[in-house]
Structures are given as structure tokens and as C-alpha cells.
């Protein structure tokens, strides 16, 4: 750092320290992580931009209330072990959150430095600390006093992992049931390797297991055990964090042709089953030359960027305009740098197939924007007579997911929103059944990793109170 | 036929359900219909043709080997109750799980007539078991080398006998043929669909089928559906989607041996 006159106020650098990244032309040919992470000097430089506000606004922007100024202070003092411990008091998955949280809408949006320049990049600092810990020291928190209660956590995604970690830290005996063969939920089946390396997720899962959580994979609650059966078998409370795994389709002609994937199918094949390594790995994926991704969220970006890495030209078709794109700005920029072409204000009407039943083109219609709808975004309205045809050989439908219906169907008395299939909960995650709590996408519909974690955290607190007050 | 020890799954499994099997660390998830259940031993069995890489690998397992993962039971169980006279039609490898239904239908107090069908006589199997379980047994082959030639004889059978329910488990073409015949006789017909699946629990949607004009997922809404309402032609088309990749995988396996990362233990 340059020497400063102690009497004059130190000048705050307006620009955040840039994140080193793989160059676009290179990274589009591999599945390795795009953002390479700060080094120690960069982390220190960025940490020094923090104003250490007396009344920090950033913390109120964080769904899990990470003590941001405190951990940044520890970084400045080079007490990295202490810094990561501060984060982990509130957040069991810092390496994940540092990578995939939309900080620009949360902590960083509230940062005072952001009023005069770029906000302090809290996410990159969190990531750097978590990565530092993985490579250096690892400290187990002290073992809590047993509270003597058994809790079942259904689903090992962001909500379940957080609830399980908090409950085990409160002294409960926690079993986590995961339907897939790997824990992590959307972190392993949904978010691609180049945004969130799977070894990092595995490391976070290992940490939660080390805390004492028992993990059972290949266990689909609702089929093998129902929620009432779990409670009969000695679990005093259940947390349901089964996510929003059911893909939505558009209900237009030709949707069942070959070459048309749901975003979930495409991402499960690529991420969870490692189809990009076929035939070394057994799960196949057929991808053509001209991929169209329908949708505009982070999932759509993940599908588009994965497709480019598999060698395809990709066009994103979104029915609203660029301003309404729900994906993170950073992801859109990354995707466009890698060669993504976006086509706005258009939606498909039907898919047409070749003689073998494989998709070959799609008929689309142009849209214009009308008045804002319930979501606050301007509603797309079809433009009469604007039909046009697009050639394509692979289509990925990324228009959203709803909760899997199995638990709802097999749990009598569990109140469910009839429109979206979400489980109805109060602000603490309590459902209509005593001792049963829910959180994350199964309660909210598809949302972010961090909001699911926030709900897992609240529900864990509520479950703890419920169990401690129960005679 | 393979039998695996999975006490938790065996305790809950019912006829009509399936499991997802992963053979090794690099393996794919494949759905297999349960065809045998022993709750006291804690085992389930499934039958498969050795047609692709994974099924060939499964066939090469020895007693005592471990699988990477078995998830289940998945799918909805069959509706087993007393219907009266039930016709059970099984084709090809699905003969094995069909017999589990024959047994359950019989135990529920039904009179069961069973039809076993294959391409040729040589691949017919479990005939003695079928004979022992059923009130009546017919056999049919595409070339007529055993029993009736094709399934047209069902038209004659239905003119002579009245059935209250028909269950078909077999290749899609067979389920389609039988459903077409039973439709004209007004016999409620249940088919078991085995489309491609990845997760098998409602996530990927690759198993989507059109039933009565609506999109259904075979894994969570099925696998059994009203045979008179299924769009079989679409299903046939969707089952072929990955044939080139499946062949490649299989051929590479034949040349190079097993690289699935499975641990022998």
C-alpha cells in the first residue's frame, strides 16, 4: 500500500479488485472454474476498501446474517483462521456462497462504498477465505452438549445442509436423507462445474458430516419412508428441504420430440452424471450444432454456457427484453464473452421434427412489452403476424421448476399451495403438521441458494425451540 | 436375473415398482423393474437383457459383488385387488416382473390367465413358474415357433371369455398391440411403461409420456398407465433417442473391458 498521511483521511479506491478469470476463448473449451479467485495480496487490498462502518448495512442484506465487517477486519489483521470461523458461525457453506450468491443484490447492494464507487466485494473475500481454509488449517468447532433429540432432514441441498449443520451444532442427532446418490442438491446436479467445482461442494458436505450429521443417500423420502413413518421411527421433528426439482414444460406442440431437453435433464446429465466425459462416464448426452435455450434465468445461462463448452453455437431465446433478464448480470456477461447470442422478445409456438422424430426447427413469435404483471416485470404480449422460423437441432427448456410432488402426496394433513405445489409454511418454516418444518425452494418455489439457506437456518432455530419446549 | 440385498428397500417394495441401479463411480443410473421380493431375506431381484454396456456389466457380476447404489422403491405400486378374471400378458424380459403381478393377483383372489410372448421360442423363459402360478397359460411367438403366431389369437379368446382387467408388461409394440385389441372389447388395460430415465424420481422429465393428451412422468405418475390412453408411437420414438450413444458405449465396453470404476469387494 502507498504511504498515507495519518492526518488526512485515507482515500478509498473506487474500483474493487478485479477477479482473475480464465480468458473466454480458453474457458469455453473446458469445464474448469471460470473465476480463479483472489490471491492473498488481492484479498488484503480488497479488505482494505471496507469502511468498517459502526452501523454496517451489509449484514442486513445477508439472508444468513454473516458478520461481514468483523470477518473483513480479521482478514486485514491477517487472522484468517479467525475470519473463517466468524463466517462459519452463521454460514456452513462459505465456499459455495462466495461463488454463487447474488451479492450484488444483497450485502454488496447495501455497502456504503458502493455509493461512491464499486461496493466492497464481500463474495470474493468470503470465497478466498473458504479456499484458504481448505488449503491451510481446518478447525472443528467444539462438540456441543447432546440435547437428546433426533431430527430428520429431508434433502441434502442448500436448505437441508444448513438446517442439518445448525441442528447438530445445537446438540441434536441429525440424519439427512438424500434421494440422489450424492449430497448437495442443486449444488451438484444443477450448478455446473465451471461455476462451482464439485470437489468444493463435496468438501462442504464432508464438513457437515464431520460435525456429526449422518447422511443417507439414495433415500427418497415419500417412497421408502413417509414423513409420518419417520416420526413413528423416533424422529421428534422433520425438516423438509426437498427443493424444486420438477421441470416445467411449455405445453406446446412438438415438445416431446427428440433433442428437446428440460434444463434439469440437461444439467443432471452434464453435472451430476458427467456426460461431458462420455464415454468414459456412462451417461450419454446428444448435443447438436445449433442449441436454443429457452428462458432467461441463471439456469438458462448454465445450460447455455455448458452447451458452448460441448461445442455448440448457442442462442438464448427470452420473451422479455435484456432489462428483465432474471439471471445475474455477471453470468450474462460471462456467457456473452463466451459467445452466447441472445434473442429477446420472442417465444416459441411449436417445434417441428425430422423424419426420425428429432427436432429440426421451431416456429416462434415476436413479443412486445405491456404493463407490468404480478412479478413487477413488464408482461410480454405476442405481436400478431410476427411468426418466424428458427433452425435448431437441440432445445433446452429452462423456464422454471416446481416442487417434486411425492412428499406432498404421501403426507396426509400437510398443507400445500394448490397452484405451485409448494408446502405452506409460516415465517419460521413451520408447516401445518406438528413437528414438521420446511424451507428452501419446496416452500418458496424456485429461488436462490442463499435464500434457501436462510430458511434452513430459521427453521433450525424454530425446530430447536419446539424440541426444547416439548415435554 | 440379479438378486441384491437391500433390506430397507425390500421391506417397502411392492409389485409394480422399480429401482434405480448405479453399478460404479462412473456408471449411469438405470431403472429396473422389481421382479422378485423376499422380505425375510431382505432381497429384491430384477431381470434384464444384456443389450448395453451397463446391463452387460451387470451380467458379469459375481456373487458377493457390490453395486455403487440402489435407490428405491420408486414409482407407484400396482393396484392389486380382486377384479375377478384377470389377463396378464408378459413379453420378453418383462415376463419376470409380470409373474410377480400374477402371483399378487392370484393371492388377491383373482382367476388369472397368463400369456407369455417372445420373438422366438428360444428366448421364452420362466414358463414353468408361469404355469404353476396361473389358472391358464398361453404362449405366443412372432414366428409361431412356440404357441400362437403373434397376438391375434387374443381376439378369439375375448370372444369366448370375458376378462375384467388386463395387465401388459413387455416391449412397447406388444403393449400397443394388446391395448388396441382390448380397447375394442372394452377391457380395462394397464400397461407398465419403461421409458428412458435418469433420476427416476421426477427431476429430469426424460420419461415424459403423453397419456390422454396430457404430459405425464412415468417415474412419479406411473409407471402404470391406462393402455387405451397412451401415445405409444411417441414413446417408441423417444426410446430411440440415445441409440447411437448406447451402441458406442456398448462396443467400447466389448473391446476395452470394464472401466466403470466399480470396486470389487
Image (cartoon, coloured by chain):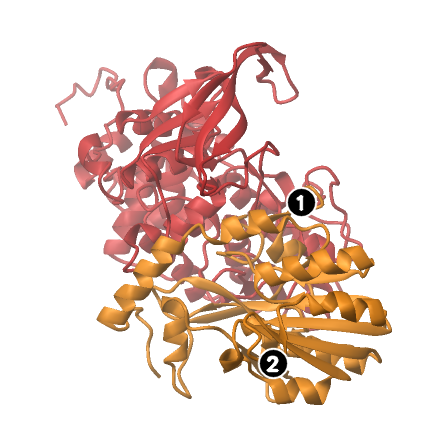
Chain colours: A red, B orange
List the single residue furthest toward the left: A3
Category of crowding for the residue at label 1, using alpha-carbon neighbours closer than 10 angstroms: few (below 14), some (14–19), many (at least 20): some
Identified at 62% across, 68% down, the residue is B150
Identified at 55% across, 68% down, the residue is B19
Identified at 61% across, 85% down, the residue is B127
Chain letter of disc 1 in the image: A
Identified at 22% across, 34% down, the residue is A21
Where residue B92 sits, quadrant-wise, is bottom right
Q: Are marks 2 and 1 in contact (CB under 8 Å)?
A: no
> What residue is shown with label 2?
B36
What x and y, as percent, mark residue A8? 22, 15
Describe the element under mark 2 as helix, strand or loop: strand
Marks 2 and 1 on same chain? no
Category of crowding for the residue at label 2, using alpha-carbon neighbours closer than 10 angstroms: few (below 14), some (14–19), many (at least 20): many
Q: Count the labels in the image.
A: 2
Where residue B34 sits, quadrant-wise, is bottom right
State the residue in front, A334 or A380.
Answer: A380
Describe the element under mark 1 as helix, strand or loop: loop
Q: Is residue A237 visible?
A: yes
Q: CA distance from mark 2 to mark 1?
A: 45 Å
> What residue is shown with label 1?
A428
Judge from the rendering whether residue A130 lies leftward or rightward of residue B2; answer left or right: left
Quadrant in the picture for the C terminus of chain A: bottom right
What x and y, as percent, mark residue B96? 59, 77
State the residue in front, A73 or A445.
Answer: A445
Judge from the rendering whether residue B194 lies leftward or rightward of residue B247; answer left or right: right
Amino acid at each position: 500500500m502507498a504511504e498515507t498521511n495519518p492526518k488526512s483521511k485515507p482515500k478509498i479506491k473506487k474500483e474493487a479488485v478485479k477477479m482473475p478469470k480464465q480468458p473466454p476463448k480458453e474457458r469455453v473449451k473446458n469445464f474448469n472454474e471460470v473465476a480463479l479467485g483472489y490471491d492473498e495480496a488481492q484479498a488484503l487490498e480488497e479488505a482494505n476498501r471496507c469502511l468498517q462502518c459502526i452501523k454496517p448495512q451489509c449484514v442486513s442484506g445477508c439472508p444468513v446474517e454473516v458478520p461481514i465487517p468483523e470477518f473483513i477486519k480479521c482478514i486485514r489483521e491477517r487472522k484468517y483462521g479467525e475470519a473463517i470461523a466468524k463466517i462459519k458461525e452463521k454460514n456452513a457453506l462459505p465456499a459455495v456462497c462466495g461463488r454463487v450468491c447474488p451479492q450484488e443484490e444483497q450485502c454488496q447492494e447495501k455497502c456504503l462504498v458502493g455509493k461512491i464507487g464499486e461496493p466492497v466485494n464481500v463474495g470474493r473475500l468470503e470465497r478466498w477465505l473458504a479456499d484458504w481454509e481448505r488449503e491451510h488449517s481446518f478447525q472443528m468447532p467444539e462438540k456441543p452438549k447432546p440435547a437428546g433429540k433426533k431430527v430428520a432432514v429431508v434433502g441434502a441441498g442448500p436448505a437441508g445442509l444448513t438446517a442439518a449443520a445448525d441442528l447438530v451444532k445445537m446438540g441434536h442427532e441429525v440424519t439427512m436423507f438424500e434421494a440422489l446418490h450424492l449430497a448437495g442438491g442443486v449444488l451438484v446436479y444443477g450448478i455446473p462445474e465451471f461455476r462451482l467445482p464439485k470437489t468444493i461442494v463435496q468438501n462442504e458436505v464432508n464438513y457437515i458430516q464431520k460435525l456429526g450429521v449422518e447422511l443417507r443417500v439414495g433415500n427418497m423420502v415419500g417412497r421408502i419412508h413417509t414423513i409420518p413413518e419417520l416420526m413413528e421411527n423416533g424422529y421428534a421433528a422433520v425438516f423438509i428441504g426437498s427443493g424444486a426439482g420438477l421441470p416445467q414444460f411449455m405445453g406446446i406442440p412438438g415438445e416431446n420430440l427428440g433433442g428437446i431437453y428440460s434444463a434439469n435433464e440437461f444439467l443432471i446429465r452434464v453435472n451430476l452424471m458427467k456426460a461431458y466425459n462420455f464415454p468414459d462416464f456412462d451417461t450419454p448426452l446428444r448435443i447438436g450444432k445449433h442449441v436454443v435455450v429457452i428462458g432467461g434465468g441463471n439456469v438458462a445461462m448454465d445450460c447455455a454456457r455448458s452447451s458452448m463448452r460441448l461445442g455448440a453455437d448457442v442462442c438464448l431465446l427470452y420473451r422479455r427484453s435484456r432489462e428483465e433478464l432474471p439471471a445475474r448480470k455477471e453470468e450474462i456477461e460471462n456467457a456473452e464473452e463466451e459467445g452466447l447470442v441472445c434473442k429477446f422478445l420472442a417465444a416459441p409456438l411449436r417445434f417441428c421434427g425430422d423424419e426420425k422424430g428429432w427436432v429440426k426447427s421451431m416456429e416462434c413469435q415476436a413479443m412486445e412489452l405491456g404493463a407490468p404483471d404480478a412479478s413487477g416485470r413488464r408482461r410480454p404480449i405476442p405481436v400478431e403476424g410476427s411468426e418466424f422460423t428458427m433452425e435448431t437441432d437441440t432445445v433446452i427448456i429452462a423456464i422454471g421448476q416446481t416442487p417434486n410432488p411425492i412428499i406432498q402426496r404421501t403426507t396426509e394433513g400437510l398443507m400445500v399451495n394448490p397452484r405451485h405445489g409448494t408446502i405452506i409454511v409460516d415465517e419460521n418454516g413451520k408447516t401445518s403438521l406438528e413437528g414438521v418444518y420446511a424451507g428452501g425452494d419446496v416452500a418458496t418455489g424456485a429461488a436462490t441458494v442463499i435464500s434457501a439457506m436462510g430458511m434452513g437456518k430459521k427453521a433450525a432455530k424454530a425446530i430447536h425451540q419446539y424440541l426444547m419446549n416439548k415435554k | 436375473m440379479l438378486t441384491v440385498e437391500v433390506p430397507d428397500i425390500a421391506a417397502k417394495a411392492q409389485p409394480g415398482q422399480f429401482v434405480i441401479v448405479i453399478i460404479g463411480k462412473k456408471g449411469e443410473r438405470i431403472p429396473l423393474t422389481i421382479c422378485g421380493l423376499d422380505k425375510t431375506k431382505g432381497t429384491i431381484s430384477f431381470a434384464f437383457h444384456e443389450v448395453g454396456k451397463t446391463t452387460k456389466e451387470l451380467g458379469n457380476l459375481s456373487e458377493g459383488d457390490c453395486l455403487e447404489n440402489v435407490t428405491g422403491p420408486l414409482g407407484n405400486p400396482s393396484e392389486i385387488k380382486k377384479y375377478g378374471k384377470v389377463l396378464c400378458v408378459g413379453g420378453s424380459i418383462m415376463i419376470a416382473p409380470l409373474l410377480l403381478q400374477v402371483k399378487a393377483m392370484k393371492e388377491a383372489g383373482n382367476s388369472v390367465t397368463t400369456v407369455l410372448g417372445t420373438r422366438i421360442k428360444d428366448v421364452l423363459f420362466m414358463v414353468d413358474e408361469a404355469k404353476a402360478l396361473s389358472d391358464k397359460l398361453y404362449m405366443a411367438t412372432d414366428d409361431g415357433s412356440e404357441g400362437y403366431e403373434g397376438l391375434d389369437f387374443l381376439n378369439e379368446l375375448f370372444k369366448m371369455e370375458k376378462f375384467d382387467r388386463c395387465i401388459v408388461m413387455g416391449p412397447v409394440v406388444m403393449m400397443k398391440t394388446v391395448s388396441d385389441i382390448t380397447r375394442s372389447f372394452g377391457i380395462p388395460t394397464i400397461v407398465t411403461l419403461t421409458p428412458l430415465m435418469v433420476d427416476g424420481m421426477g427431476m429430469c422429465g426424460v420419461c415424459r409420456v403423453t397419456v390422454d393428451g396430457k404430459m405425464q412422468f412415468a417415474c412419479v405418475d406411473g409407471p402404470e398407465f391406462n393402455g387405451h390412453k397412451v401415445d405409444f408411437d411417441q414413446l417408441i420414438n423417444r426410446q430411440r433417442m440415445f441409440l447411437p450413444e448406447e451402441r458406442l458405449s456398448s462396443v467400447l465396453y466389448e473391446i476395452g473391458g470394464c472401466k466403470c470404476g466399480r470396486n470389487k469387494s
